Amino acid sequence: MLKSWRALTLWKRVFIGLFLGVIIGLGLHYGLGEKGEKIAQDWIYPFGTAFVNLIRMLVVPLIATTLVSGVIAMGDPKRLGSLGARTIGLYLFTTFFAVWLGLGIGTLVQPGIGIENIAEGAQKGMASVANSLENAGAANAGIADKFISIIPRNPVQAFAEGNVLQIIFFSVLLGVGILLSGEKGKPLGDFFESAAEVVMKITMMVMNLAPYGVMALMAWVLGTNGLGILSSIGKLAFALYLACFLQIILVYGGLIIKGILRLPVKRYFYGIADALGVAYSTASSNATLPVTISCAEHNLGVDKSIAGSVLPMGATINMDGTAIYLGLVALFASQAFGIPMGFGDYVMVAVMATLMSIGAAGIPSAGLLLAASVLISIGVTDAQATMIIAFIFPFDRLLDMMRTVTNVSGDIAVACTVAKWEDQLDEEIFKSESVV
């Protein structure tokens, strides 16, 4: 039995864990009532949190070692400029489609129409929002401040605090410095290349625990909330999931993988299945990064120099799911409060959602907390914005899970594209049957 279980690919084991977590969670919630909710919170939640912490433990060393070794593998610092320009250009390209897709779906579905007693429903999430907003200063910082904050005053502090943008900036500079140092820098370069391999091995050890971590997380979410998590914001959840599915299938699969790269879409989705399972359960692009890099390298044939530089950047600045969400929340608020929106307002929301999604803070429900600035831009008052955020907050975990799946899917699609353009994509591996 154990041998058969281990013979299954990781993504199959993850989805089995996901299914079992749903069954256990619903059984606790509806079978045992308040007692079941307490069991889910006190006994199951810690196991899910432990799994997430194991993954997050690896994020900083993984980003640092893979980025430095990735830059070294390029061999020429000049390549970094073209690669960076292509990467950022592609991320902005996909975000453009994402935000307008979200606005289009929101206009058709109209998730805010018929929402009554928002003030009443908001009371449930008001305290949580108040606590979270205290830590959300980075999320609502100005665009200029965001760019300035990329440069670390103290690299050691950036690593200790897990500031991903600052770690990326310093790691790239360190890699370039090693290249420019020639033979004298080779010992340090060898160290980082060796460290990257070691960290990746540890990552795969942790990933074998993913099915159990996913089961615990899903059992906790549904055990404490039940299916009622969808009752109050069913239309918003439907609109988000639909827009995200279309973004993944049409933009990443159809336009990029099939249209631009002329590669089989089916293989792309099989190849990223492990990452999607972890992304959906953890609701964190950074926490999913270790398995994202592994999928890109081993399942899709992306060279480690590309995977190690493009994907950490994508986990921080490519937030297509968040861009979709911000547009939808803006429409949700305008429809709920009866605020008319013209074409100019749509453009404003699109620009704001694109800019605000770049480098979103790595805090719980960061996408929702970013929405305050977008809402105010269309005439929503501060009080109304807080009310909307508080109304959605208790249900945001389920929405955040789908946003993260979209972000991770886009990260890997862009990595494949950049690798193809840089002649660093092994198409034989990409087309291989072994990934299923």
Image (cartoon, rainbow, N blue to C red):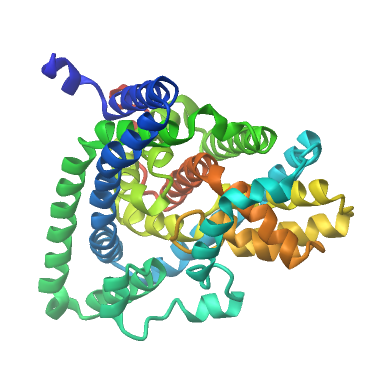
Q: What percent of the width, then of the height, locates residue 186?
A: 13, 72
User: Which residue sits at x=35%, y=54%?
Assistant: 306
Between 381 and 314, the one nearer to me in the picture: 381
Between 270 and 80, the one nearer to me in the picture: 270
Q: Is residue 149 above or below residue 29?
A: below
Q: Quadrant of residue 250?
A: top right
Q: What percent of the width, then of the height, locates residue 389?
A: 63, 55
Number of labels in the image equals 0
Q: What percent of the width, then of the height, locates residue 265?
A: 49, 28
Q: Residue furthest front?
A: 34
In the picture provided, is 12 more to the left or to the right than 203?
right
Q: Answer whether residue 108 is visible to the viewer in this image.
A: yes
Q: Quadrant of the C terminus?
A: top left
Q: Is residue 22 above or below residue 168?
A: above
In the picture provided, is 66 more to the left or to the right than 365?
left
User: Which residue sits at x=63%, y=31%?
Assistant: 231
In the picture provided, is 176 more to the left or to the right than 416?
left
Q: Residue furthest bottom?
A: 153
Q: Is residue 216 above or below residue 349?
A: above
Q: Quadrant of the N terminus?
A: top left
Q: What percent of the width, then of the height, locates residue 247?
A: 60, 38
Q: Answer whether residue 100 is visible to the viewer in this image.
A: no
In the picture provided, is 158 more to the left or to the right than 81?
left
User: Which residue sits at x=68%, y=53%?
Assistant: 388
